[in-house]
Image (spheres, rainbow, N blue to C red):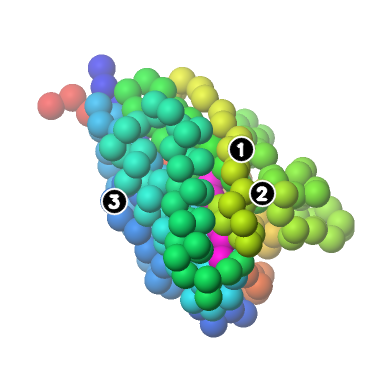
Amino acid sequence: MTLRLEAAGITHRGTVRDNNEDCIAIGFWLSQETMSAGRSFDHALDQPFACIVADGMGGHNDGERASLLVARSLARRLVAAGLAGLGATVRSVNAELFAQLRDNPELAGMGSTAVGLAAHEAKLAIFNVGDSRAYKVVPGGLMQLSVDDSFQPNWKAGSGVERSTKLLQCFGGRSTFTDVEPHLLFEPCVPGSTYLLCCDGLYETLTETEMAALIGENLQASAEALLRAALEKKARDNVTIALVRLAPQTPP
C-alpha cells in the first residue's frame, strides 16, 4: 500500500521586521509573502516529496534572494531525484548560491539556512544546514531531529540563556566558496508520524512545550495557531512553519 502525507505551511514577517527573508517550499509551491492563512497539501509517496524552510541573511533584498534560491533549488532537485544522493544535492545547492555571489559581487555576504524533509515510498529524510530546526511530535512533546550549526546547539526558549546567532555553517554567507556538511537523518515512513519544520523566529519565541500543545489533528489549523501564538508573543523575527504527517494511502 502506497503511503501518502499531509502537509501545511505558513510564513510571516513577524512583528518587527519590514520584510520577510524566509522562504517556504512544499513541492513546487513557494512563498515569501506574509500569509494570513496556511496552505495545505496532500501527496502520495509513489512520487518524491520535499518540504523546505529557509531563513535568509544579508540584508533587505539579499536575504530574500538567498532563501528563495535555496528553497526553490532544493525542492526542485529533491522532487526530481528523491532521496538519492541527498548530501550531494544539498552541497550542490550551496555551490549554486556561491556561483550567484561570484557573478554578483554586490551580493557579498548573502546566505541562508535551510531545514528540509524529503520522502519517497517508505523512506524519509531530515536534513539541515544552519539553525532552522526539524522536530518530531512524540508522546509528551517534541524531539529535535535537526542539529543547530551554532555555538549553543541545544538552546531552548525559556531557558534564560541568551542565544548566540552566529552560525558555524550556512549556504553562502562568505566571501569565498566554503563547502557545507549537511546534517542527515534517515528513518522509515511510519503512518501517524508528525514533523514540524521551522525557522528560529518560531522556536526563539515559543517553548517546545507551547509548540507541541498547538499541534493537533488539522495541520493547517495547527500551523496557523503556532503563528498566531508567536505573533501574540511579539516575535521579533520572521516566522515560518511547516507541518508534515504520514498517513496510509486512501483506497480508491
Q: Is residue 2 magenta?
A: no
The residue to which callout 2 is attached is 169
Q: Check contact, mark 2 vs mark 3: CB within 8 A.
A: no
Q: Is residue 247 above or below residue 196?
A: above
Q: In percent of the image, x 80 and y 58: which residue is there?
A: 163
Give how far across and how far down residue 190 sits, in percent. 44, 23
Residue 160 or residue 25, whichever sits in front: 25
Query: Picture quarter containing residue 56?
Result: bottom right
Counting residues from the start of the chain, the first of labels 2 and 3 encountered is: 3
Q: CA distance from mark 2 to mark 3?
A: 26 Å
> In terms of secondary structure, where does tag 2 sit?
loop
Q: Is residue 114 magenta?
A: yes
Counting residues from the start of the chain, the first of labels 2 and 1 encountered is: 2
Q: Check contact, mark 2 vs mark 1: CB within 8 A.
A: yes
The residue type indicated by label 1 comes to Glu
Q: Is residue 219 above or below residue 109?
A: above
Residue extending furthest left? 252
Q: In percent of the image, x 63 and y 62: which residue is there?
A: 175
The residue to which callout 3 is attached is 28
Q: CA distance from mark 3 to mark 1?
A: 25 Å
| Residue span colored magenta | 110-115
